Image (cartoon, rainbow, N blue to C red):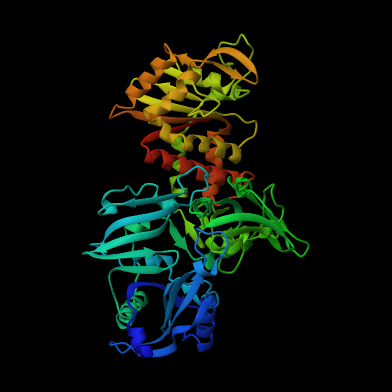
């Protein structure tokens, strides 16, 4: 076959990555050649097909430079430990680069390591990608999205599917989600979009290279003539131009996302983790390392002797983790984490810090409360500040909390009740009398500190005491406890087996066996379990979540939130920003399980 015969023998999907040029004009032949060399660094033998910058005329009189290479390479199968030449798999790879004046389109398979070309091109703008194929008749069949909230116990990722999601889901809370992937249906013309990588995949049969070029040209023309307008997707987090906003950004906290790295471990992509110092390696437990990054970490602003700003992440495991505010993006730096190496089953390896930078698997929030940075983009929750009045309705002041001195109070072997000046004592004095059953579930694998069973609702009570004022870390802890137990408001019957023994016992703490029965009101543990099982079958059952805290005053919080909304400075600004995000997260989580939420605090 001739080269043209070989090229025409290729069958391609209407599936490609679309990019805008950093500078107008065609890519150089040298850059294409370098890209092919990078892509084929592990090829065996000669190129099966290679063409560079072949001019291709399209029927609408447009022109495009088409470059293509196809090659073989070998790979060690994932199910063997040591490489055996005879066992290596022989695979084929290809990359097609369509070069327009303003845009570049890339289709590839089994290709990695093409870094240089990405200095010349950038992904299509998020707003353009998300709205490019939407009209009044568009059906939204599938969403995949990430939660941009900094609370560590929220559902981090969500995927949902329906005939048309805009008819099935509420827009409440969507503003705190970043849409990553979606599938659209326009009169049975289905298109899948990956917004982070600007990949467009039109469902349909494969066709030859000429048809692929015509399709790519149609999409490029559609991008060039695109005019943005509000759509259903405007309910999600709003993307902003990082470069334009950078000067006003001061990072204050970071949450590392563990989803991707956990997935890589579960799928056996990661073989091992080592600490490499010089030419010596020592195997380490990655889980232990990551546990140090599982909570929200504060970022400290520092000024060096030359007056230059830097942003240091406060963590006990390393003392050199820096947030770098670059021209177009945010990255992380740490020479110590550079030495923690992930080794993959395909024999590749990467440091843990480079891994996180590659995927931007973290959420950073700023002293501009409504903004977060995640997955290489800056986003705004445009309803966060506007919902302050609604958030404050969740806080219910109670003056009795001014007299509380501890969480559980003092104990002795003769104690039959919690101290009046404790949070536990406060909860029982306020909420026990109206209940049919009231249980202390504190300690162990608890669902809540107290559980109240009433005639038409179930209530979970989570209590947290602290001597500080506006403690974001303590608030994060109690919000996390509440969020991770929301599913237990409607537990499966098998879950009660472990509760029968616990609820039949007395409350014991710090090696003191008290006379405080776990069933604080009601006939017995078994009866309370049967009542719980009966309640959760009621179709109109109400579910309520209470956070009982003494370290926040509603009037003081309201004052700080008003200052925050006006852009004023105050001492607890960073803590209040984080508390606002945590409240937003908790409200959204409770709405998703049809639960009411109340935060009982000082006046």
Displayed quadrant of residue 403: top right
Residue 456: tell me if it is visible: no
Q: Look at 46% across and 34% down and name the residue there.
A: 485
* The N terminus sits in image quarter: bottom left
Q: Could you say which is closer to the camera, residue 344 or residue 596?
A: 344
In the rendered image, residue 253, in percent from the top left (x then y), is placed at 60, 51
Residue 45 visible within the image? yes
Q: Is residue 522 left or right of residue 443?
A: left
Quarter in which the C terminus is drawn = top right
**81 relative position to 335: left or right:** left
Q: Residue at point 45% right, 18% down?
A: 438
Residue at left offset 31%, top offset 69%: 202
Determine the image quadrant of residue 387: top left
Q: Is residue 73 above or below residue 468?
A: below
From the top left corner, tell me how far across and down residue 583 is, in percent: 49, 41
Q: Name the residue: 47% across, 83% down.
A: 47
Which residue of the protein is positioned furthest toward the right in this rendering?
305
């Amino acid at each position: 076959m001739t080269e043209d015969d070989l090229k025409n023998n290729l069958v391609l999907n209407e599936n490609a990555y679309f990019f805008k040029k950093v500078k107008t004009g065609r890519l150089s032949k040298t850059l294409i050649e370098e890209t092919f060399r990078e892509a084929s660094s592990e090829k065996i033998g000669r190129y099966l097909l290679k063409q560079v910058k072949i001019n291709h005329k399209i029927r609408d009189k447009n022109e495009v430079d088409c470059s293509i290479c196809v090659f073989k390479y070998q790979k060690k199968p994932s199910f063997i430990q040591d490489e055996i030449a005879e066992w290596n798999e022989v695979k084929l790879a290809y990359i097609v680069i369509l070069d327009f004046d303003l845009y570049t389109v890339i289709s590839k398979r089994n290709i990695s390591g093409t870094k240089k070309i990405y200095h010349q091109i950038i992904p299509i703008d998020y707003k353009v990608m998300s709205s490019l194929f939407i009209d009044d008749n568009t059906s939204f069949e599938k969403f995949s999205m990430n939660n941009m909230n900094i609370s560590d116990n929220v559902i981090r990722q969500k995927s949902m599917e329906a005939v048309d999601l805009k008819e099935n889901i509420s827009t409440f809370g969507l503003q705190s989600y970043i849409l990553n992937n979606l599938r659209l249906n326009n009169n049975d013309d289905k298109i899948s979009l990956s917004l982070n990588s600007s990949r467009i995949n039109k469902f349909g049969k494969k066709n030859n290279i000429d048809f692929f070029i015509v399709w790519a040209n149609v999409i490029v023309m559609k991008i060039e003539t695109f005019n943005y307008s509000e759509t259903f997707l405007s309910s999600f987090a709003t993307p902003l131009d990082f470069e334009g906003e950078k000067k006003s950004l001061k990072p204050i906290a970071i949450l590392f996302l563990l989803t991707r790295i956990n997935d890589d471990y579960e799928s056996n992509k990661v073989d091992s983790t080592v600490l490499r110092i010089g030419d010596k390696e020592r195997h380490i437990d990655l889980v232990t390392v990551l546990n140090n990054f599982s909570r929200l970490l504060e970022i400290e602003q520092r000024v060096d002797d030359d007056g230059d700003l830097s942003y240091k992440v406060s963590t006990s495991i390393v003392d050199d983790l820096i947030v770098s505010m670059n021209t177009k993006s945010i990255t992380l730096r740490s020479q110590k984490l550079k030495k923690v190496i992930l080794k993959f089953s395909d024999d590749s390896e990467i440091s843990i810090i480079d891994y996180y930078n590659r995927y931007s698997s973290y959420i950073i929030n700023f002293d501009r409360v409504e903004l977060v940075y995640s997955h290489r983009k800056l986003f705004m929750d445009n309803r966060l500040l506007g919902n302050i009045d609604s958030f404050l309705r969740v806080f219910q002041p109670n003056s009795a909390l001014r007299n509380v001195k501890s969480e559980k109070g003092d104990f002795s072997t003769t104690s039959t009740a919690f101290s009046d000046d404790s949070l536990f004592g406060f909860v029982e004095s306020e909420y026990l009398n109206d209940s049919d059953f009231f249980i202390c579930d504190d300690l162990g694998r608890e669902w809540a500190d107290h559980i109240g069973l009433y005639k038409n609702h179930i209530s979970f009570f989570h209590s947290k005491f602290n001597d500080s004022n506006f403690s974001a870390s303590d608030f994060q802890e109690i919000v996390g406890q509440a969020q991770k137990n929301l599913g237990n408001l409607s537990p499966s019957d098998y879950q009660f087996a472990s509760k029968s023994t616990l609820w039949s016992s007395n409350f014991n703490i710090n090696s003191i066996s008290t006379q405080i029965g776990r069933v604080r009101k009601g006939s017995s543990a078994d009866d309370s379990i049967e009542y719980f099982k009966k309640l959760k079958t009621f179709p109109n059952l109400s579910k309520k979540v209470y956070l009982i805290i003494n370290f926040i005053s509603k009037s003081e919080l309201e004052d700080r939130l008003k200052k925050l909304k006006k852009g004023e400075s105050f001492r607890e600004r960073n803590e209040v920003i984080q508390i606002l995000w945590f409240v937003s997260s908790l409200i959204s989580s409770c709405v998703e399980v049809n639960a009411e939420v109340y935060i009982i605090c000082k006046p």
